[in-house]
Amino acid sequence: MAKDICELVQSYVEYVTNVFSPRGIIPIFCGVPARIRRGVALTSNGETMLSYVIVEFNQALAMETKKRNIPFLGIYSLTNDADGQSSGEFHIGPIHVFPSAFGHLTKQL
C-alpha cells in the first residue's frame, strides 16, 4: 500500500505543479491532520488502517515536496499525539482544522 500512496502523491504533486507553474504560481501543499479522538467510530482494524494511511500520505507528500523544493505545511506534526491522534485543539470538527493552525505552520516557511 505504501507504494500506491507514493505513486498517488507523486501524480498529485505533478498535476498541481503542471497546472500552476505556467502561471508563475508556486503552490503550498498541506498534509492531512491527525484523526480527532471524538470523530467517527471505526473498528480496530479501521483505526489502524486509517492511522497508517494518514502517516504514509503525509510522509510521501513531505518527501515529494522537499524533492521538488515546494513549500509543505506539516499539519500532522502539529495535531498528533503519541498515539497518532489529535486532542482536537486545532480542529473545527472531526476532520478540518481552524485557520489559526496554518498560522502556526506558516512561521516555519
Image (tube, rainbow, N blue to C red):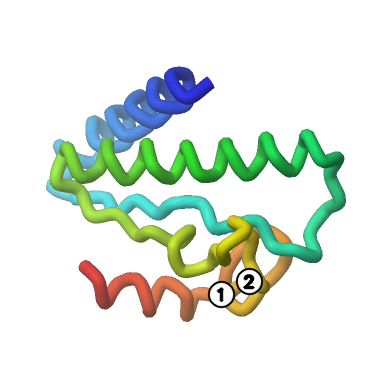
Q: Residue at x 43, y 25 (%)?
A: 8
Q: Position of residue 97 (x, y in %)?
A: 58, 68
Q: Residue at x 27, y 36 (%)?
A: 64
Read off the residue under disc 2. 91
Q: Is residue 58 left or right of residue 52?
A: left
Q: Position of residue 58 (x, y in %)?
A: 43, 45
User: Tag on residue 89?
Assistant: none
Q: Mark 2 to mark 1: distance in Å?
A: 6 Å
At label 1, the amino acid type is Phe
At label 2, the amino acid type is His
Badge 2 local density, few (<14 within 10 Å), some, or many (20+)?
Answer: many
For this rendering, which residue is in front, 9 or 44? 44
Badge 2 vs badge 1, beta-carbon distance below 8 Å: yes
Read off the residue under disc 1. 98
Badge 1 local density, few (<14 within 10 Å), some, or many (20+)?
Answer: few
Label 2: state its secondary structure.
loop
